[in-house]
Amino acid sequence: MAKARGKLSDGALAAFNIKHPRGHGGRFVKKGSAGAPTVPAVTPSVPTPAGTGRAAQRMRAARPAPTPGSWPSAGSSPAPAAHVAPAPAPATPHAAKAGRARAAFGASTSKPSAAAPPTATSSTAKVDTARDAIYGRHPKARQMAFQLSAYGGLRRDDFDGLSAAEKSTLLGDLSYIATTSKSLASTKRAQKLIDRFTPPGTPHGHIPTQSVLPPVSAVAGQTRFPNGLSGRLTVLPAGQRGQSGDGWFRLKNGQSGPWGKYGASGLMLRHVDPADGKERYLMVQRGPGISDPGKWQFPGGARESKEDYFQGAAREVVEELGFKDTDLAGAQVHGFHEHSIPDGWAYHSIAATVNKQLKPDLSSHHARMETADAKWMTRDEIDALDQRGELLKPLAGGQLQANVMSLFPPKHRQVGRPGPVTTKPARLAAAAAIAAPAPTPAKPPHKPSTGRDLLPDTATKDALRQQVKQMRTQYDGKTADGRLAAIGALQGFDDVPTVASKADMDKLLATGNYIEAWRGVRGSTGSAGFRATRGGAVSQTKSAADINEELRSGPAYYGLGIFGNGYYFATDKGFAEQYADGTKGSLVRVLIPKSAKIVPHTKVVSEARAASSSRSKAKGQVGENGTLYDEGRYAAAKGYDMIEIPHTTGPHVAKPGKPAFNILNRSVLVVEEA
């Protein structure tokens, strides 16, 4: 990757999905890409309702992103209307409505909103309840009230996961209610559910292979390929890519424009799990060597002069995430969203599905400077990032979902919209035990470990120290150990744990797969003799209950300890009670998965001491004061979830057969609700 110095002029445009320096200093920037775009020919576009967002990927600009509807200095221009290849939509009410589209990037009548977070009742349980009605497994399966309740709990994604026969039965039940019910409320509710699962405009009475109608969520600037395109995401050999696209695009007025001399493109990959039908999307977190570190987006970058947009996006993904050149060859491209400016620069956001979850490799120092993490995420997880403000600004507020994610077709074929039904539909398969699918397996009760070895060699170890030195400024003052917080963020250890009821905790403990542990804390409101008098601003300004609630749902707070910094838990409840202040909520119960990555204290402390010193040098710079000397930081950098402390090492926190633990990755825990 090339290095670059420089500063945007006052008229510079914010670039999409490009890495660039945060001002002066020669930080890494991404390679560019190039040439005129090569895209399949499409028929005349079908106007669709204007979207509220823009194609927004990893912005590599030194300036804040422009607000929707305006582009500084270059003026605003309408983006191309969304269109579908290869055939225009038939004249339907939906298409007529779409014909009233407004220009792209203008003010919209409604702003796309992120999906609501999952409710307390799991989606799989609601699907099972709906199938109880469909297959007649419930005593009240044929009653209208039960059917409305069971089907009303399904989301559109749940409905798409049903078989064609299940969908037909469900819609038949709802249509029968809407047609024959004497209750106006039941009729309206049934019709609303029909609209949820088969929006107005859906063809009647059949299951199309795939509708060529732009979906309701289509936005201007989209081009769709209903049958998919394969073989487009290829990586050209180095000698055939042409000139590097590194550099700012030059506007007609002579000022610097977006990053990428020849334009840029990004790639959002989807994988559909064949076992459970769950969709997951590949997202990356920006590293410390670029602007907006910690924000999430999908990968991409500037293209080189002889690459088309598909080839440029494929190369960027391969380079950034350590994939093989052939990994994307079989991907199905569903379409792209284009944003362009009058001066000729354009950015293409490409949506494609792969047949397996490719595993990112961020082991190189350069990769970690630009990409702190890479994960396959569900739509709910992406929506949650949006709600927490963790998406890059141009992607936020539903723009990622509206502009890019809406390009993906449903993972299941859609059933036709029902007409009037006057005879109560029969239940599916009298032999329900044979015909009905088994209840959907429950999700794993705890999150998997995300840790990986960040210390494979001496050079990488020194690079990690420098990286932590830059990142710790985000956490110093917010946690007792900013360096451990930085390492935890790189590993994904700062994610929140799973929260469960006491009854569910008891059931998990009975499986024999978990270790029960306790944490006691002292806050500012403890009784005399137990009130916190030290421990920093947190324990002196917050109640014990608030501190433990932060463990469940707040930002990660790593404490100091003689067995390494981190969260301390005892498997002997009596020891934990000694550290609690006696107030309600000062003691919290957790379950530790036996499958977690656990390292004995004696092993990790010897390795940490051998790997560092209390005043270590990182690339010749003194002052990191033993970043890896602390066994908690070292263990976290090695990818361990926790350190086991036996009674021989810590007799004041452990007994024979009852060890204590220093938790570094709280996300693998199951924590009892307050």
Image (cartoon, grey):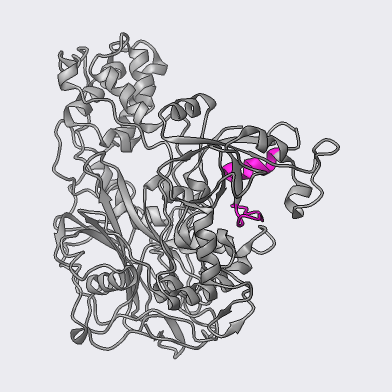
> Is residue 549 within the magenta segment?
yes
Determine which quarter of the picture holds residue 455: bottom left
Determine which quarter of the picture holds residue 549: top right
Q: Is residue 330 above or below residue 76?
A: above
Instruction: Using residue 352 as the reference point, say whether residue 571 is left or right of it.
Output: right
Residue 439: image location, x then y, percent: 28, 25
> Is residue 99 within the magenta segment?
no
Q: Can residue 389 be seen? A: no
Q: What residue sits 56% from the left and 46% below the top?
A: 646
Quarter that holds the C terminus: top right
* Residue closest to the eye, 524 or 15: 524
Region in magenta: 545-566
* Residue closest to the eye, 563 or 96: 563
Q: Is residue 462 above or below residue 510?
A: below
Determine which quarter of the picture holds residue 230: bottom left
Q: Is residue 199 above or below residue 194?
A: below
Residue 53: image location, x then y, percent: 43, 59
- The residue furthest bottom is 254
- The residue furthest right is 528
Instruction: Using residue 470 as the reference point, say whether residue 278 is left or right of it.
Output: left
* Residue closest to the eye, 102 or 501: 501
Q: What residue sits 38% from the left and 17% below the top?
A: 186
Residue 544: image location, x then y, percent: 72, 40
Quarter that holds the N terminus: bottom left
Residue 22: image location, x then y, percent: 53, 78
Q: Can residue 558 be seen? A: yes
Instruction: Using residue 34 as the reference point, say whether residue 580 is left or right of it.
Output: right
Q: Is residue 122 above or below residue 371?
A: above
* Badge count: 0
Q: What residue sits 55% from the left and 70% below the top?
A: 468
